[in-house]
Each structure stands twice: as C-alpha cells, then as structure tokens.
Amino acid sequence: MNTGSTGRTQSAIAEVLAGTRRGPRAALVFAGPAIVASVAYMDPGNYATNIQAGAGYGYSLLWVVLAANLIAMLFQALSARVGIVTGRNLAELCKDHFPRPVVLAMWFVSEIAAMATDLAEFLGGAIGLALLFDMPLMSGMVVTAIVTYGILLFEAQGFRPLELIIGAMVGVIGLCFLIEVFIAPIAWGDAARGAIMPSLPDATALTIAVGIIGATVMPHAIYLHSGLTQARAVVKNDADRRKVVRFSNIEVVLALAAAGLVNMAMVMMAASAFHVGYSEVAEIETAYHTLTPLFGAAAAGVFLVSLIASGISSSVVGTMAGQLIMQGFINMRLPIWFRRLVTMTPAFVVVALGVNATEALVMSQVVLSIALPVPMVALIVFSGRVDIMGDFRTGALVRGLAILGAVIVLTLNFVLLAQTFGLPIPGL
C-alpha cells in the first residue's frame, strides 16, 4: 500500500537515487530495516543470558558479547545486500536453488528456531508486565499477546508505520540502559579488560557463552533482513543498487553497534549489581527484586520498562520473520492472527507446565544457536555466487570473515553438544 508515511518514504528514496535529494538527511529515508532487525539483538533472551553472565562471571564474558555483535554486523549486512541485489529474500533463494528435501529440512529447522525465538520474546514481555503491574504471569502473557497483535495490524499500512513503532521501542530500550549505566557503579577498567581479553572460566561459562551467541546472532533476523530490503527501494540499475547497499551498510553498523552497547550495558549492570554478594542471581525476576534494595525502585522500574519494550517489539519482529520464513520456503502465508497464535502457544505451554521462565529463556537461546548455521551457511553460499549476485558478490576478504564467523559458531555448538552429552572437553 503506497500511501501515508510509506508512500512518502518511497518517494524520498526515489529522489535520493535520482540525485535530487542530498545531504545527511537523505540517509534517514533508508533507515528502518536494520533498526527492525536490531530488535532481535536486544530481545528478552539477551536479558536472561546477560544477567547470568554478569552475575556469575562479572565482566569476564564481555568479549563474547563483542565478538557476537561483530559477527552479527557482518551477517546482517550480507543479508540486506542479498535482498537489495537479487530482489529475493534468503528463504526464497533457498527454495529456488536447493533440492526440495533440503529446502523442507531447512524450513523445519527454521520454524523450530522461530518458535524458540518467540518463546523468549513472548515470555520476556509477559514477565516484565507481571512484575511491573503485580499481575499473574498468565495475565501478562495475555496482555502481551493483545498488544503485539495490535501492533502487527499496522503492517497493512505499509512498512513505515511498523518501522517507526519498533524504532521508538528501540529508543526506549537504549535510553533505559543508558540510565542504568549511570545508576550502577561500573568498574570501567575491568569492563575494558573483559571486552578485549577472552576467557572461559568453566563449563558453565561456556554454556552461557553459547547462549549469548544464540541470543545475539539470530537466525530469524538473518532471514528477515533480506526480506525487509528486497522491495523497499525501486532500483533501476547497478548504480542505484550500490547507493542502496552503501546506505544499508551504514545503517547496519550504527543499529547493531547500538544493540551491542545495550547488551554490554546489561552485562555490566549485572556485574556491578550482582557479581559480588549476589552471584547466584540467574533469573530476571530475582534480578528485579534484588535491584530494588541495591539501587532503588527507579533502577528496578527502568529495567522492567526496557524488558517490556524489548519483549513486545521483538515478539512483533519474530512473528514477521516467521511469516517470511514460511512464505519463502513453502510459499504459504497464514493470517497474522493464526501465525501469532501458533508461535505463542509454546510459551503458554511452558508457563502452564510450571517450567522456570528464565531457564526456558536461556535454553531457547541454546536452540537458536544450534539452528543458526543453517541461514549462515546459506547466506555465505548465495552472497558469494556470481550467477546470483553478479558484480555484488562478496570479495575474498569478506567471504573469509563470514566463513570464520560461521566456524566459530559451529565450533561452539559442537562443544556445547559434547558438554550436553557428558563428553569431556579439554581445558574445562
């Protein structure tokens, strides 16, 4: 629907590509896809793993957050590039170029990842609402379901209204953690060392590290970003594509750098608040109740506001990604209400069975980390193929870095599986 803010944005994009609109503000009309994708890097799964990392190991796992964020930047940039250049999203390219059995297997794994994603996001928003307004968790889940469905209805008005809503929520999350960093007494020297000096103190730290990777580099975000860029700007030639790719790369770096800083702020807050004296804090609910006597009700309240914004916005984005994955792989589109119902059902089941909510969040991130190589490998393959990307295929350096990032994730996954099945891990 080419009306309202979406129509104005598309007209402005056309003016920039034609050269009639210039200046710093010209880049703003291209902003949106990476901001939406960045929500996946600040979802409630990050809260769970980051609190555990900071409380249990202080600042020593900050390097994992930084490394995961750099890998995320690279793969989100590649995903956006593929969508811009080919006009196809990653799931559609998989369907076009891989054998049918492989496509079905990829779709199945991706759907499991999408459900694990929504479990984390949906539970996070519900936990925040339940704690802030002192309501039962099940009631918080119902409210979260209604709000997210209401926001998803804006998708019928085009891409811009949804981008603006999600962008506002990203701003709220960022502001909340900026406030938290000022409230909590951060040991900046220790934080700097933790960010640049890799260490894994024990096997539990490894599990948390893999959870951080799973919570930061998100399978559904890699799929979604290619879809958000594939038809947003009407490109007529390679010169237009180069402009759009350049603006996209700038947005990816800025949006994901902000998301990375938010994640590091989460770890630093948890390290400052809980590592000495409260290192056993591993749950969002416990973190909230412990923050109040330590730093006051304001710190605890700000924490919950950020969690609610994170849960609602990321749940919206997760539903969008799930729809794109299903449509791309098997050419099936479900009504939004039905898709929302399917993806949130596991969260209701988990709560009804009495499973610890934060443990469910952390394990969902491990599932995501196991599923992550599927879109990563597909993206490396497609972005490097000259028959698909033409002159926009990735160069040797970028392809090498992408392969290195995938190897790091695959290695962590292998070690985690060995640990899960009780196999000895040298050095741990």
Image: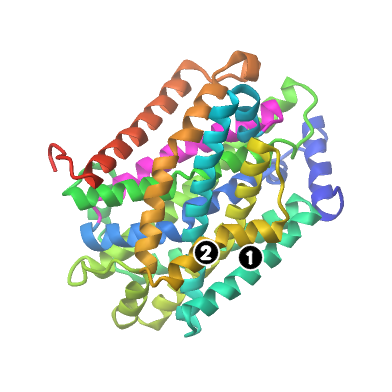
In the rendered view, would you say 283 is above or below 32?
below
Residue 89: x and y in percent read 65, 34
Q: Residue 345: say if magenta.
A: no
Which stretch is magenta?
59-88
| Residue 122: image tag | 2
* Residue on which disc 1 sits: 148
Residue 52 in sight in this render: yes
Picture quarter containing residue 107? top right
Q: Amino acid at mark 1?
A: Thr
Find numbered disc 2 in the image and state the secondary structure of the residue it sits on: helix
In the rendered view, would you say 104 is above or below 146?
above
Picture quarter containing residue 162? bottom right
The quarter of the picture where the C terminus appears is top left
Residue 229: x and y in percent read 68, 38
Q: In percent of the image, x 77 and y 22: which residue is there?
A: 237
In the rendered structure, the answer to whether residue 81 lies left or right of residue 287 reads: right
Main SS, magenta residues: helix
In the rendered structure, the answer to whether residue 402 lies left or right of residue 221 reads: left
